[in-house]
Image: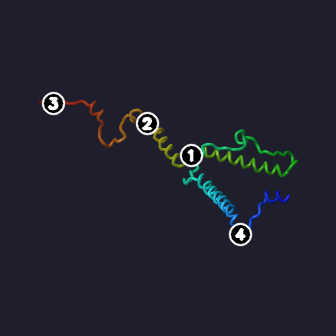
């Protein structure tokens, strides 16, 4: 039993015993082992470390969810009817109202027209309606009537012969 204890838990020898002449080889061996262990630890620590800046995280184009509930448009998980479980019914009511509000906001966003868009549409609409109700002769006339007769009218007028 004494040998088993020494082999599993070796005791350290005193300083005076290690300084004796016949123990010098043991002292050198122990020091070499300690130096090797320290060198190996230093090499292991330095060996696998690279001095590079950390890579920035890329934004994923995909939305990963652990559940397929969003894909299938499933209703609230726990259900209760006719007052069987009032707490669950309250949760269901809150969830349902939230879902309805989200759906209403989405519909509003889809159908909303800004004031600027509406003004642009109205401007173009006024021109189209005005053009529709003008007579054909007025449509062919240029908009700027104060500039004088148009080149078309000058081409159609009778020209007097010259007396040369």
Residue visible at 74% across and 66% down? 13
| Alpha carbon separation for disc pair 3 and 1 | 65 Å
Tag 4 near tag 2, CB within 8 Å = no
Res. 136 mark = none
Q: How busy is the neighbourhood of tag 1: few (under 14 within 10 Å), some, or many (20 plus)?
A: few
Q: Mark 4 vs mark 2: which is more N-terminal?
A: 4
| Alpha carbon separation for disc pair 1 and 2 | 30 Å
| Alpha carbon separation for disc pair 1 and 4 | 92 Å
What residue does disc 2 label? 134
Q: Mark 3 vs mark 1: which is more N-terminal?
A: 1
Q: Mark 1 vs mark 4: which is more N-terminal?
A: 4
Q: Mark 1 vs mark 2: which is more N-terminal?
A: 1
Rendering coords of residue 65 (x, y %): 69, 44
Rendering coords of residue 155 (x, y %): 27, 31
**Tag 2's secondary structure?**
loop
Res. 113 mark = 1
Q: Mark 2 vs mark 3: which is more N-terminal?
A: 2
In the rendered view, tell whether residue 135 sits above or below residue 9: above
Q: Mark 4 vs mark 3: which is more N-terminal?
A: 4
Mark 4 or 2, closer to the camera: 4
Mark 1 or 2, closer to the camera: 1
Res. 162 mark = 3
Q: How busy is the neighbourhood of tag 4: few (under 14 within 10 Å), some, or many (20 plus)?
A: few
Query: As rendered, which of 45 and 133 lies closer to the eye?
Result: 45
| Alpha carbon separation for disc pair 4 and 2 | 120 Å
Query: As rendered, which of 141 and 73 lies closer to the eye?
Result: 73
Query: As rendered, which of 49 and 15 lies closer to the eye?
Result: 15
Q: How busy is the neighbourhood of tag 3: few (under 14 within 10 Å), some, or many (20 plus)?
A: few
8 on left or right of 154: right
| Alpha carbon separation for disc pair 4 and 3 | 142 Å
Tag 4 near tag 3, CB within 8 Å = no
* Residue found farthest to the front: 22
């Amino acid at each position: 039993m004494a040998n088993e204890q020494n082999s599993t838990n070796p005791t350290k020898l005193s300083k005076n015993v290690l300084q004796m002449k016949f123990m010098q080889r043991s002292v050198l061996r122990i020091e070499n082992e300690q130096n090797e262990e320290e060198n190996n630890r230093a090499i292991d620590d330095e060996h696998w470390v690279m001095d590079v800046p950390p890579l920035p995280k890329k934004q994923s184009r995909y939305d990963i969810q652990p559940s397929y509930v969003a894909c299938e448009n499933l209703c609230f998980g726990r259900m209760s009817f006719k007052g069987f479980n009032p707490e669950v019914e309250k949760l269901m009511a809150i969830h349902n109202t939230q879902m309805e509000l989200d759906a209403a906001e989405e519909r509003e966003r889809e159908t909303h027209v800004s004031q600027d868009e509406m003004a642009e549409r109205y401007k173009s609409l006024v021109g189209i309606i005005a053009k529709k109700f003008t007579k054909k002769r007025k449509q062919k006339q240029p908009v700027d009537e104060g500039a004088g007769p148009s080149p078309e009218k000058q081409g159609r007028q009778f020209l007097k012969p010259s007396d040369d």
